[in-house]
Amino acid sequence: MDYVRPLDWDHAQVDLAGGYKGQYIYVGESCYIIATKVPPGAGGPPRHVHASDQTYYIIEGQIDLSLGAEDLQIPAGSAVFIPAGLPHQNFNRGEVTEIHLEVIAPGVHPTAGAVATLSDVVDVPGLAGFVAASDPGKRGTDEFTLDWLVNRAKGATNAAIYLAEVPAQKGGPPLHVHEFDQFYFVLEGELNVEIGFEHYTVGPNNLVILPARVPHRQWNDGDVPERHLTIIAPEPLTMDEPWDVAVALAETGERIA
């Protein structure tokens, strides 16, 4: 399995008018993760709904979004949560290319159950999305800080997303596992990741895939802070107990086959 996958528009599976491109970086049962590039003047499919929840995180530029009865302009560094069944369509009315990451959870193919929505159908009673802006003032410990954007407490039950920052020469918890799938999308700096017995140095615009029960840890060997987006699918039902379980690996070197 390729645990580290780059954003690469030459391998985009979606290619629409105006240079609109989408790359399926990860496809699984818990979620799909898609990188999307929208040049000025381009737009996504006509207003539609999905059978799963969808979240956009805007990496560059500004997204114009028709969401239910609202028309929104959402800047980089923000997330927007779109619950299953809520009509929406994205555009780029700006002057620079817009790039965002899409998380569709659970992992139902985005065209499965998606239907074009009539232009006059703009709202679904009792169904609403939300926009979450990052708060650079939020801080955690000296080793690791995070800023929740989308989670169960805000109404997203199938996937949670937070921005994480690892200061220079600091790191997260020791080698551990957990019961959910986890993903890192590096935004700035370089993240050192150990997965099993392998070590990776991951730069910006790369997705790190950490399936449930796969041992891993992360830290920052660099001289500048590292920032990444963390995706958890699904988020555990409770935060009352620690999610991570420490493990130890040993390789005997004995050839058994």
Image: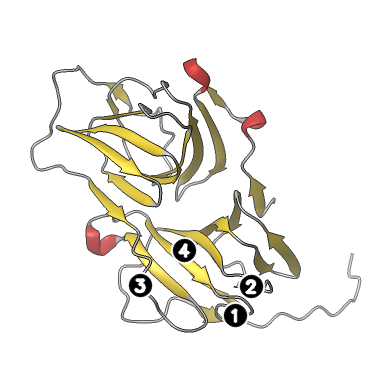
Above or below: residue 118 compared with residue 170: above
Residue 220: numbered disc: 2
Q: Is residue 189 left or right of residue 250?
A: left
Residue 42 position in % (x across, y down): 42, 21
Above or below: residue 144 compared with residue 160: below
Q: Say which amino acid is labelled 4.
A: Phe
Q: Say which amino acid is labelled 3.
A: Lys
Residue occupying image coordinates x 48% and y 26%: 39
The alpha-carbon separation of the residues under discs 1 and 4 comes to 24 Å
Q: Earlier in the sequence, mark 3 or mark 2?
A: 3
Q: Can residue 126 be seen in this view?
A: yes
User: Would you identify the image quadrant in which residue 52 lies?
Assistant: top left
Could you say whether the residue bearing mark 2 is in a helix, strand or loop? Answer: loop
Q: Earlier in the sequence, mark 2 or mark 1?
A: 1
Residue under circle 1? Answer: 170
- Total numbered badges shown on the rendered structure: 4
Which residue is at the far left? Answer: 125
Residue under circle 4? Answer: 180
Q: Which of marks 2 and 4 is nearer the N terminus?
A: 4
Asked if disc 3 and disc 2 are in contact, CB closer than 8 Å, the reply is no
